[in-house]
Image (tube, rainbow, N blue to C red):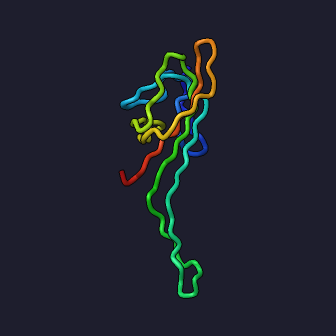
Amino acid sequence: MAALLKLKSGVTVVWGSTEVATGTVAGYGIVRSASKKRDSQKEIVPDNDGAAAAVVYFDFTDDIDIEISCKSSMTVPTIGANLTVAGVTGQVQDYTFKWEQKGVKVFSVTVKHWDNI
């Protein structure tokens, strides 16, 4: 039975559901784990003595990692494809196969979303 879970990181996942992703590369499987990291670039602005006076944050991103178990016949998303995970649409950066046995495979996918794109 499916359950919506909100992780401490703020990521909401459907745990135990068959649908884990939507968009141009819909995928089906079970979410084994998920994490979301909010990040940005930063520039430290020095004062006249060279000490930090301010920090400017820019280029905000969301980095999402999910691990999925699914049927061996499932096609993994291609790098650069749009994928929506936990309400965030981003581009697939990479994927890693963990293992495959008896018609089931496990892989992880990294998705990155840039706020200014």
Q: Is residue 51 above or below residue 102?
A: below
As drawn, the residue found furthest toward the top would be: 102
Q: Looking at the image, which is closer to me, 74 or 2?
A: 74
Question: Quick check: 117 left or right of 34?
Answer: left
User: Which residue is located at x 62 percent, y 28 percent?
Assistant: 98
Quarter of the image for residue 87 reads top left
User: Which residue is located at x 58 percent, y 36 percent?
Assistant: 34
Residue 64 point in image, percent of width and height: 52, 42
User: Which residue is located at x 54 percent, y 17 percent?
Assistant: 72
User: Which residue is located at x 53 percent, y 72 percent?
Assistant: 44
Q: Looking at the image, which is closer to me, 86 or 6?
A: 86
Residue 46 point in image, percent of width and height: 53, 79
Residue 12 point in image, percent of width and height: 52, 37
Question: Quick check: 99 left or right of 116?
Answer: right
Q: Quadrant of the N terminus?
A: top right
Please state the total of marks drawn on the protein image.
Answer: 0
Q: Is residue 102 above or below residue 96?
A: above
Question: Quick check: 113 left or right of 35?
Answer: left
Residue 10 point in image, percent of width and height: 55, 44
